Image: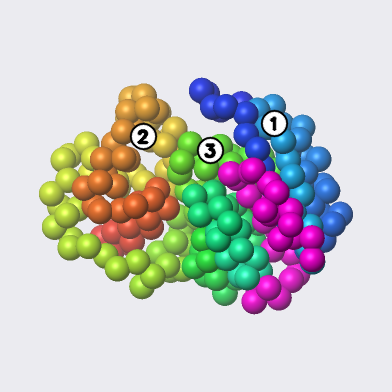
Amino acid sequence: MPWNPEGSEVVHLAVHSPHHAVAELLAVGLRQQSGIKRVDMLPPGSGFGRALRATGARLFVVDCGSQPLARLTDLLDAIRGAQSTASLLVLAPQDREIMRAVLRHGATALVSASDPLERCMEALRQLEQGHSWLPADLVGELLNGNHAPRPQSAIDQLPPRQRQIFDLIGSGMSTRDIATLLGIGVKTVETHRMRLMQQLGLRTAHDLVVRAVQAKSRSA
């Protein structure tokens, strides 16, 4: 499925895997997608730091591979240190410990390493629009206690439409899915998301998703 999100510009990605062959396959698949201008390779080992400093990418795709968890988290910290506002998609195995670790170390999207490329592309579309892509059924479990909740009254005081959108975010729905369900424009949903972040004192779209999922799990 070609990537050509409505109204988006072509993008510049950087890809890393501890296995060169995997990184090459990822890069080839991504370069075939319309809307992607450039894919840089961040090699493992001594060349990683130099490549990271040289890339101008704002979206990173990191394959966990079979590398030790400590090395993986050091790598994520290095990317965050060099590109504090970048979006970071991690291809992770179905391992709770690894998922917890990559979320704590800055991942803004999680996709299973066994998922098809189309799912990776959908996650990148959401990141390009400034959103997170996290498995809604796992966020509450994985991030419980990592984000201090604000008083529940802050949610109770939301206007009806914003509360409705907040609840849908907590159910794992994307911006586009919410717009379709409610019969409103994508830009309108994005405006509501921005206002939700302001009213709840949240800094990032990632924090909004986490807060919404936590609120949903408490009310279940």
- Mark 3 → mark 1, Cα distance in angstroms: 13 Å
Q: Nearer the viewer, residue 130 or 138?
A: 130
Q: Nearer the viewer, residue 6 or 135?
A: 6
Q: Which amino acid, by three-letter code, is at mark 3? A: Glu
| Image quarter (top left, top right, bottom left or bottom right) of the C terminus | bottom left
Q: Which amino acid, by three-letter code, is at mark 1? A: Lys
Number of the label disc, if any, that sits on residue 37: 1
Q: Residue visible at 69% across and 63% down?
A: 64
How far across and down, in percent of the image, does residue 35 sit? Answer: 65, 28
The local crowd at label 3, few if under 14, some if 14 to 19, many if 20 or more residues have their Cα within 10 Å, is some
Q: Residue visible at 42% across and 67% down?
A: 143
> In the image, which residues are magenta?
46-71
How far across and down, in percent of the image, does residue 41 sit? Answer: 77, 49
User: Can you tell which quarter of the image residue 1 is in?
Assistant: top right
Locate residue 46 relative to residue 34 in the image: left or right.
right
Number of the label disc, if any, that sits on residue 128: 3
Locate residue 164 relative to residue 210 in the image: left or right.
left
Q: Is residue 66 one of those drawn in magenta?
A: yes
- Residue 194 sits above or below residue 182 on the image: below
- Number of the front mark, 3 or 1: 1
Dots 2, 1 in contact, CB < 8 A: no
Q: Which residue is mark 2?
A: 190
